[in-house]
Image: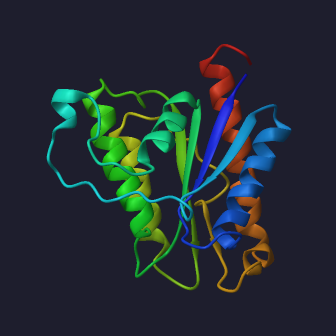
Amino acid sequence: MIKILGIVGSPRAGGNTEILVNETLKAAAEEGANTELLRLCDKEIKPCDGCRACRKTRECWINDDFRPVFDKMVESDGIIIASPVYFSSATPQVKALIDRAGYLSIARGRVFENKVGGALVVARRAGQNFTFAELLFFFLHQGMIVPGSSYWNVAFGREPGEVLKDGEGIETARNFGKKMVWVIKRLKGLG
């Protein structure tokens, strides 16, 4: 069974970023994947303090909600990390997650290597390209396989639900979900 985890990095539940992730996961499920949506808005994930203790202990010493999220990432075949644009960047919740997950992955022997992953970004007006690239750098640094779609995985909307009016953005996200499953099936010898 193919498992894809969609991580919503918005501090607001039910917003445009979550809607976009849900569309992507629905498309992946239509292709046979088992999907899970995980919100960071109800989690406390503190920023990395750069102590590098994980290199010795293979654990992060910070006591918060990071560990269960990291474990779900490790267990998944595919990982989606989605963020709204906050001042031309990913949210602090997303940044804290990718910094700590990246360091811990390296400490454990690059546990995300050859998994399939990618980013989704929602913007009101601008900043989407930098935010998209910022998230892609995490996946590429971790040695993950990032499939393309029909365009950049970006959609536009400000008010809750407004992202659904961006037909091209929704279709791009859905295509990305399908492409993730296609790639994972081939990597696992299932297609």
Quarter containing the N terminus: top right
Q: Which is more toward the observer, 135 or 183? A: 135
Q: From the viewer's perspective, is residue 157 above or below residue 107?
A: below
Q: Residue furthest top?
A: 189
Instruction: Please tell me which residue is depicted at 50% across the width and 40% down the height of the picture.
Output: 68
Left or right: residue 189 versus residue 170 is left
Left or right: residue 75 versus residue 134 is right
Q: Which is more toward the observer, 61 or 134? A: 61
Left or right: residue 170 versus residue 95 is right
Instruction: Please tell me which residue is depicted at 60% across the width and 60% down the height of the picture.
Output: 153
Q: From the viewer's perspective, is residue 164 above or below residue 148?
A: below
Expressed as whole percent of the image width and height from the top left, the position of residue 125 reads: 56, 85
Left or right: residue 17 versus residue 110 is right
Expressed as whole percent of the image width and height from the top left, the position of residue 24 reads: 72, 52
Q: From the viewer's perspective, is residue 86 above or below residue 141?
A: below
Colour treatment of the image: rainbow
Q: Residue furthest front?
A: 63
Give the number of marks.
0
Quarter containing the C terminus: top right
Q: Residue furthest right?
A: 30
Expressed as whole percent of the image width and height from the top left, the position of residue 106 reads: 28, 32
Expressed as whole percent of the image width and height from the top left, the position of residue 102 reads: 33, 42
Q: Quadrant of residue 172?
A: bottom right
Instruction: Please tell me which residue is depicted at 79% across the width and 70% down the height of the picture.
Output: 167
